Image (tube, rainbow, N blue to C red):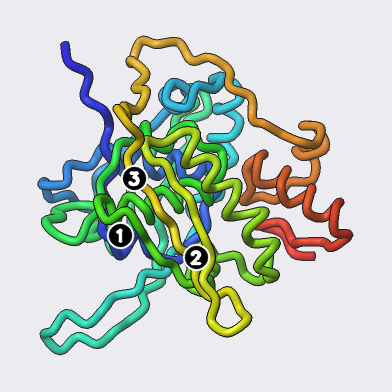
């Protein structure tokens, strides 16, 4: 029996939208998106389901750890918003910005360690019946990433698959990732956002990527990404019956300390990077989900 890898398919407008999701929230959303048939009409009544065991199998983590993350992420997803930017369609529609939620309903079944959700009606056109201007990739390409920034960067690069280069404006990237004033210094942005994200794309995905900066005057205004397919690149696809093995996040600080001080929107690796930044610079960055 041939194993068909799960595919994530999003409209390009959604790939380039402005939003912030934690790694656990991304995994829930992407796992449910991978269940949608791109060529099949759906309604906002369709219920999608994903379990901690299924996510653990994809990510190579323990079900117990995933179970705890899934429960917390499910509670937050209902409140998550996304800003979508729509260009003129040539038929009189002017540029506009739409703010909507990802899901209209989300249910966490504790005894099964399972999340069930319905996407909002406004979200459906960006996920189904896509015939042009969409991006598709294997869920396994990002499943083992522990940085939400890495997942977003991979999508932005794979959207331009085959070009080998993408130039991204720094201010646009800040808005797309909803950094909201965090890492306002370009050195901090590179060290705590770009470099970890590029490292994870190189380690876990089928792409290799390098980057450079472009200045306007003395100010760094653009990041230039060069990328391509790794030679003989084949993503590791866990079989449905494969038992998950523990892959511990690579933390620089004690895990207990990171867990105690991480924000509601952060994964362990992202919180570890932020806390390191605070310790080394003496400057406090508000963790996502909390205010200073």
Q: Residue furthest right?
A: 282
Q: How many labels does the image show?
A: 3
Residue nearest the observer in this picture, 60 or 105: 60
Q: Gap in Å between the C-alphas at discs 1 and 2? A: 29 Å
Q: Is mark 2 on a helix, strand or loop?
A: strand
Image point (42%, 38%), residue name:
142
Image point (41%, 36%), residue name:
205
Q: Please indicate, yes or no, whether residue 56 appears anywhere in the rendered image.
A: yes
Assign the N terminus to one quadrant of the image.
top left
Q: In which quarter of the image is residue 68?
A: top right
The residue singled out by tag 2 in the image is: 223
Q: Gap in Å between the C-alphas at discs 3 and 1? A: 30 Å
Q: Is mark 1 on a helix, strand or loop?
A: helix
Image point (33%, 15%), residue name:
239
Q: Earlier in the sequence, mark 2 or mark 3?
A: 2
Label pair 3/1, CB-CB below 8 angstroms: no
Q: Please indicate, yes or no, whether residue 182 appears anywhere in the rendered image.
A: no
Q: Which mark is residue 252?
A: none
User: Measured along the vertical axis of the image, is residue 255 above or below residue 30?
Assistant: above
Percent from the top left, x then y, of residue 94? 24, 87
Q: Earlier in the sequence, mark 3 or mark 1?
A: 1
User: Measured along the vertical axis of the image, is residue 122 above or below residue 74?
Assistant: below
Left or right position of 106 against 90 = right
Q: Dot 2 surroundings within 10 Å: few (below 14), some, or many (20 or more)? A: some
Left or right position of 265 against 58 = right
Q: Which mark is residue 123?
A: 1
The residue singled out by tag 3 in the image is: 228
Percent from the top left, x then y, of residue 278? 82, 55
Label pair 1/2, CB-CB below 8 angstroms: no
Q: What element carries label 3?
A: strand
Left or right position of 25 against 135 = right
């Amino acid at each position: 029996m041939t194993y068909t890898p799960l595919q994530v398919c999003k409209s390009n407008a959604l790939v380039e939208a402005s939003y912030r999701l934690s790694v656990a929230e991304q995994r829930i959303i992407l796992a449910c998106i991978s269940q949608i048939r791109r060529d099949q009409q759906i309604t906002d009544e369709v219920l999608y389901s994903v379990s901690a065991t299924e996510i653990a199998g994809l990510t190579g983590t323990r079900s117990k750890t995933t179970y705890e993350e899934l429960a917390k992420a499910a509670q937050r997803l209902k409140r998550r918003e996304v800003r979508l930017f729509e260009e003129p369609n040539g038929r009189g529609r002017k540029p506009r910005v739409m703010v909507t939620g990802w899901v209209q309903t989300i249910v966490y079944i504790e005894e099964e360690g399972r999340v069930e959700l319905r996407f909002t009606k406004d979200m459906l056109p960006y996920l189904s019946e896509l015939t042009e201007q969409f991006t598709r990739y294997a869920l396994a390409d990002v499943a083992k990433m522990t940085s939400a920034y890495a997942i977003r960067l991979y999508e932005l690069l794979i959207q331009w698959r085959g070009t080998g280069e993408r130039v991204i404006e720094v201010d646009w990237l800040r808005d797309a990732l909803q950094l909201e004033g965090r890492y306002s210094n370009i050195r901090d942005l590179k060290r705590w956002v770009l470099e970890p994200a590029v490292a994870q794309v190189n380690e876990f995905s089928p792409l290799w990527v390098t980057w450079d900066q472009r200045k306007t005057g003395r100010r760094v205004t653009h990041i230039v990404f060069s990328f391509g397919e790794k030679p003989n690149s084949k993503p590791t696809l866990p079989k449905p019956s494969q038992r998950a093995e523990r892959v511990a996040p690579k933390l620089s600080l004690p895990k207990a300390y990171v867990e105690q001080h991480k924000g509601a929107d952060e994964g362990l690796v992202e919180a570890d990077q932020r806390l390191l930044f605070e310790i080394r610079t003496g400057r406090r960055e508000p963790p996502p989900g909390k205010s200073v």
